[in-house]
Image (cartoon, coloured by chain):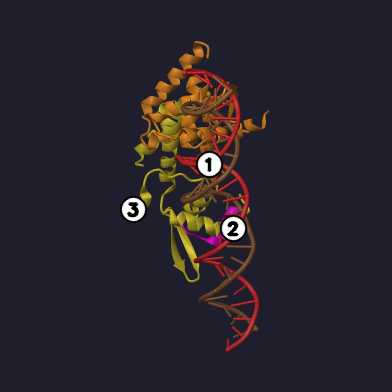
Chain colours: A yellow, B orange, C brown, D red
Amino acid sequence: MTASENDSVALSDPQISLMRVLWTRGEASVADAAAALAAERRLAHTTVATMLTRLEKRGLVVARRDGRQLLYRARLAEHEVRRSMVSGLLSTLFGGDAKALVAHLLREDAIEPGDLERVRTLLAEREDSGG
Amino acid sequence: MTASENDSVALSDPQISLMRVLWTRGEASVADAAAALAAERRLAHTTVATMLTRLEKRGLVVARRDGRQLLYRARLAEHEVRRSMVSGLLSTLFGGDAKALVAHLLREDAIEPGDLERVRTLLAEREDSGG
DNA sequence: ACGCGCGTACTACAACTGTAGTACGACACA
DNA sequence: TGTGTCGTACTACAGTTGTAGTACGCGCGT
């Protein structure tokens, strides 16, 4: 277990955006990332570089040298980050009770009752076909 | 619309703990809050005071003077904070798709398929009895 | 009336984050 | 080979947060 695989990963919104670029492309240079991010947030090249350096220091990404440039790669899969962050929110706001979160989603009209069945069915199908 | 009722409320864990005291007790002095928090986090009296002052500056709590002491009260209900924070997580991590979050909960074993029915039924009952 | 204690107000400081500029080295092209 | 360009490394700076100390004033008790 490398120190970075702690458990509680908390990424800010800009950081997630950046990670998403890595998740999507597998590997990306600063220029790649800045370009991919440009649509969403127009950031200076060096800003993206700084963010990546910091994420690397935190152990969330790894850099590989390719000539002059660095290629970054996420060390955690998206679902791992999701798990960690959802779990954090869950314990912070819902006493760790996932059912309470679902109830909240229903109550706050974020989701409709019928959707629950749909989700369950979807998951069941995926399990059947070997996920 | 008072500036504070923006929409995106982001509270850290310690901040939520403190808010929870206010939600539970309705109103609390610094001493009250520090005492209530002591079980969870042992913080200096002044630390709690600072946190409350800052939350007040952000418009998340209001203070009322009672003699020498200040009584703090949350300006947002717990469900409002939940809504805001869940919604933030939802858009950050799941593209705003609540179904994806539920799917995640199922897949990550945070919740079992049967629980969905239970939640749905529970909610339905509550609606029937006029919620 | 006076002093002590409680409570707030202000100050402090390190860490992290968002954001970006400057400096410097290396590679490619002329 | 010289030079410019590109890319990283380092520095910067303001804002927020976690955490707490110091200072000061008001009111209660004697």
Task: From the image, tell me which residue sits under label 2.
Answer: A35
Query: What range of the chain is rendered magenta?
Result: A26-39
Task: From the image, tell me which residue sits under label 3.
Answer: A2
**Label located before the other in sequence (2 or 3):** 3
Residue sitting farthest toward the left: A1
Residue C10: x, y in percent?
Answer: 60, 39
Residue type at mark 1 is Thr
Is A108 placed left or right of A59 in the picture?
A: right
At 42% from the left and 49% from the top, the residue drawn is A77
Magenta span contains residue A33: yes
Check if mark 1's residue and mark 3's residue have beta carbons within 8 Å. no
Vertical side of A72 occupied by B8: above or below: above
Q: Distance between the residues labelled 2 and 3?
A: 31 Å
Q: How far apart are marks 1 and 3 (CA)?
A: 26 Å
Q: Quadrant of residue B64?
A: top right
At 45% from the left and 67% from the top, the residue drawn is A65
Residue D30: x, y in percent?
Answer: 47, 18
Label number found at residue B92 = 1
Q: Main secondary structure of the magenta part?
A: helix
Dot 3: what SS? Answer: loop
Q: Distance between the residues labelled 2 and 1?
A: 20 Å
Q: Do circles 2 and 1 both sit on a common chain? A: no
Check if mark 2's residue and mark 3's residue have beta carbons within 8 Å. no
